[in-house]
Image (spheres, grey):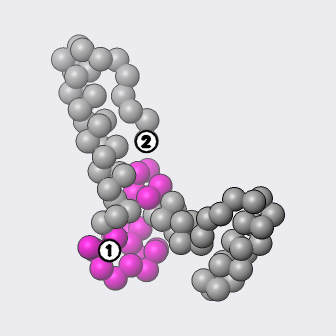
Amino acid sequence: MSYDTVRKLVEKIRVKIGFYFHAHQLRHTFATNLVIDGMNPYHVMTLTRHKSVNNFRRYTKAADQTAAENAYFEHLQNRGNVKNKVDG
């Protein structure tokens, strides 16, 4: 499916639901969720056809933040201070 086809479908959906979003948001959500779910970022980058690691980094920021929060709460839990951890 081409980007133009996706863009046209998104436009039809936008009109139907009355909520503005653009096709690139789907790519961003797709990539971010795969990284958060633990998929190798290199593979995600391949799927999204990014050529630059620097451009791809915007998709890994949410995963980095979630991992840092989970590590922090795991550290506290190991010390016996907290029982819950952040869900990705």
Q: Give the residue drawn at x 25%, y 36%.
A: 71
Magenta portion: prevailing SS class: helix
Which span of residues is magenta-colored? 32-56
Q: Give the residue drawn at x 24%, y 14%.
A: 81
Q: Position of residue 27 (x, y in %)?
A: 52, 69
Callout 1: SS:
helix
Q: Is residue 34 left or right of residue 4?
A: left
**Is 36 within the magenta?**
yes
Q: Position of residue 42 (x, y in %)?
A: 33, 69
Q: Position of residue 74 (x, y in %)?
A: 26, 28
Q: Is residue 66 left or right of residue 22?
A: left
Q: Which mark is residue 55?
A: 1
Q: Is residue 1 left or right of residue 71?
A: right
Q: Give the residue drawn at x 38%, y 72%.
A: 45
Q: Residues within 10 Å of mark 2 (few under 14, many from 20)?
A: some
The residue indicated by pointer 2 is: 88
